Amino acid sequence: MSALRSKIRAATPTLTAAVDKLCARWLAPLDKRLGNSEFRPKQINDAIWGSVELTPWEVALLDTPLLQRMRGVRQLGLAQLVFPGAIHDRLEHIVGVVGAVEQMIATLDRQIARWNRDPRNSARQLPGINEGDRYRLRLAALFHDLGHGPFSHAIEPVLEVASPLGTTGDAVWREELAQMRLLLQGEYALNSAPATSEVIAVAIILSDAVSQLLGNDNFMERGRWAAAAKIQEQLTACIIGAVEGPGADHLCAIVSSQLDADRTDYLARDAHHSGLHIGFDTERLLSKLEVLQIRADNTPGADAGLRERIARRAPDPVLQIGIAASGFGSFEQMLIGRTFLYDRLYHHHKVRAAEAMAQRMMLVSERDRSARFSLEEIFLSIGDDTLVRIIAEEVSHSGLATNSPAAARLARGLIDRDLLHRAFAFRSRFIATPPGLDADVAEDSRHEQWRRLLKGLDGLGKRYDVGEEIYDLAKRIIATLKAADVDVAAMDAYDLALDQSGPEQIIVDLPIRKADAIRILARYPDGNLKVPEFSFNPVKWADAYDLQKRTGYVFCPRGVVPVISLAARIVFLSRFGVVMGTDADGVIKAARAVEPQWLAPLVAATIMDQETADLLDQRRHSLIAVRADDLCVPSKWIEEDPYFAIKVLTEIKKHVGAGLSASSLKAFSAIMEAMFAFVDLWYDGGGGLTAEIADEADLQERLGNHFRSRSMKVEEGTAVGGGKLDLYVEESVLIENKWQSGTAATPDVIAPSAGIQGRRYAISLMSQIIITAAAYRQDSGKPVSQKTDLIEVRQITKADGNRAEIRFNFPYGAKTPSRDKGS
Amino acid sequence: MQSRYDRAELLVALWKLGADNEMMPTSHGILDRALNALRSALPPELGTLSFSTTGVGLRCHELPDILLAAQQAELTSEPNPTYLSTIVNLRSERAIELAIMHGLNPLEAISLGRDLKKQVDLLKSDMGEMAAVAA
């Protein structure tokens, strides 16, 4: 047994046992046939590579459940619901990769022969590709995708340790899967971290059943080139694209690298079957592949690690597959073509809707049976269509127990092609900034809000939560409008449709594309080997192209689009402070953004405030992210602590991250400026610090007078929300005053519920900020607080998505101001 | 596990604080090597990255994803004429804010940012010298 296999299996016993069991079952038919049957080579007609010839042992392997279970696991998941021709499965792709490997070997063989024939290279001959190399690369091609389950990438969250829906159980093998990935990263030098499907493929290769098969002389007969343990290491290295490590050599790149047989096949195949005319100059690209000889004298940009590798191999060169400079054009074409495939095929909005439904269906199915899927259930050897029909409860399977009406509804939608529709679209460019704002401020605010939005939606769990919030809000909107006798027939229909779909069919979706980077060396005409990105980097170009077009959607059933559209707009405004401009309506093809007759009843019922209604309907622009300058911290304070304003801002933004409206921000700035001036007066102008503050009314009078002295509008004692306000300044910010006769151990304990008390008024007044001015007697035994320590920002309740309490804790009655005075 | 957006925020903030308006390198493994050199000094978001000597030299496995996240979050912007580096869309004030959010005090963040810039300059100069020797 190889050291690699022992180490990995010892560290992952649960996963190993589960995979062993699966592989034993999948390979049992072949085990019985070995020695009794004769296998013959086969020629398979392939849409991309023409005739692909398989060796007898490849045919033997192909005709086992190990590979046949890939039949029906569609290469493009549910894209066939939009591109009817895209029904090719992973088995077809796997055979295609064998064809691509063979083509790559043939072109490299020619290059090697050409090089070796040249008399100038007599001292630097390249090793040829022998039969053993060929067999292992082809075998690696057969194994490379076996780690994929149904729906290809849509199932990946089911394999994660933590379910986005919180379903628990069956965690050990999932944790071991992550552990195996780390082990492989430790054992090998890799171009990139292995994907989950690759790790599972490695577990399959290292299984007992595959070990026995590879060690059985009846399997490969005369084809055997190494002992089973060695072959397993080589296949592992090929599948994870190892550069160095057990079983790795330069030829591994043919199976897994930036320019490998896998990618060469799937790009051409996906374009072909989907009917998209995206050209890949595969023949030219392959013809420009070369086995490069990396030496210290031809790799001027080599870093210490690469130089060390070169030194370890000296006097022999390090061999690596790269590309001739004259192949750059085809290489760029491949990378750019892939970008177009993402745009037009993989990220087509209907394909995304279907994939999102399948993903949710699997996770909801786990949730509703209160148990995660086992490895055996995930690799049940059934095609995508069958799995959907099992979850839809059309058919049953003894190996898979499901009992989820919600998942069944999603499955039904996939079977009937009743896919979810776009109710709301979001994109950075769609964020509408307030008119009249300085261009830099507007741009900065947009960047800030977009960043916050992306983080708030990063991960399926977060996106599902937002979807459920939208669903709940939509239900409240419907109930309110029904009660107000507005569009009752439509509301009844929406209500029924939402009851039938459940919150599971409100899905916030944002496409994800795996990051790429150039990991291949190119031979320049002067013979030097370099990273081919000096004049143009197609990967970066692709990122830029993709991001320009990347659009997030809120999907929902067709019949509830108007109400979900409104609920989504309200949720995105309250959570992230964003209103999407009219361009966004074009993407979702909405007849109108908001039904105007719905707004007044919703405001009256406090589903939203008037400002929200105006922003969504008439004004159609976002809130503004608060900046440090908006706090108007006095320059003297900044001189003493240059980062004071930013520190306070950071605290404010933890709770008021969505920002403020333009008018609120203006008032907020003026009030903060006044409050800081009040603190200065309190400390420096013979104000409250050394005075006796008689009671709360005394504090309120001083503060009220201060605002009035600055010509600010102040209301006092106004009846609002079933109570009376202390101070309401500039028709925007509520100020609560609190007074304590005694000293406080720490000022933050004075009137701890002031924020909560102010909240009910703030909601009525649409205020995001509540300021609490709290006075407490200075303890004569303690030093007076620094001015900057008086200020504290608090969350009011967890339910307040965009509201905070800013406290100013004022000490009074200090006896020795000259010695204890703050800054 | 750290989110790629958290990592992107911190990386770009440090770069802004250390290099101000200079573009951040995104190719040829320069940033990868600088991060590797500073690994022990960096906060967990960036101190736990994994590195490997790939076929083109030392690279960080997570960096492509972090740089893409930075671009997605509009902390940086592409395209630019070279594609070898990226424009940082962050004011210094925001960079400090992000550093504080990630548990660094501003002075510490500025110092780390300067170290990162220094490493990058060193690596660029080494690369230039190596290329000159080879030529």
Image (tube, coloured by chain):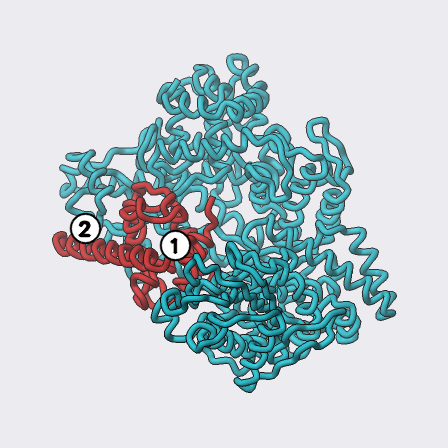
Chain colours: A cyan, B red
Chain to which mark 2 belongs: A
Q: Please report, as a chain letter, where disc 1 is located.
A: B
Q: How far across and down, in percent of the image, does residue A303 sit?
A: 23, 47
Q: CA distance from mark 2 to mark 1?
A: 38 Å
Type of amino acid at the residue the image marks with label 2: Pro
Q: Is residue A518 left or right of A162 when viewed as pictured?
A: left
Q: Which residue is mark 1?
A: B104
Label 2 Cα crowd, 10 Å radius (few <14 / some 14-19 / many 20+): many
In the image, residue A710 sits, relative to residue B52, either above or below, namely: below
* Above or below: residue A8 compared with residue B124: above
Compared to residue A392, the image places residue A739 above or below, namely: below
**Relative image position of residue A343 (x, y in whole percent):** 53, 59
Is residue A381 visible in the rendered structure shown here?
A: no
- With A255 as the anchor, is A587 left or right in this view? right
Residue at mark 2: A300
Q: Residue at x 56, y 27 (%)?
A: A66
Q: For the residues tagged 2 and 1, is the chain the same? A: no
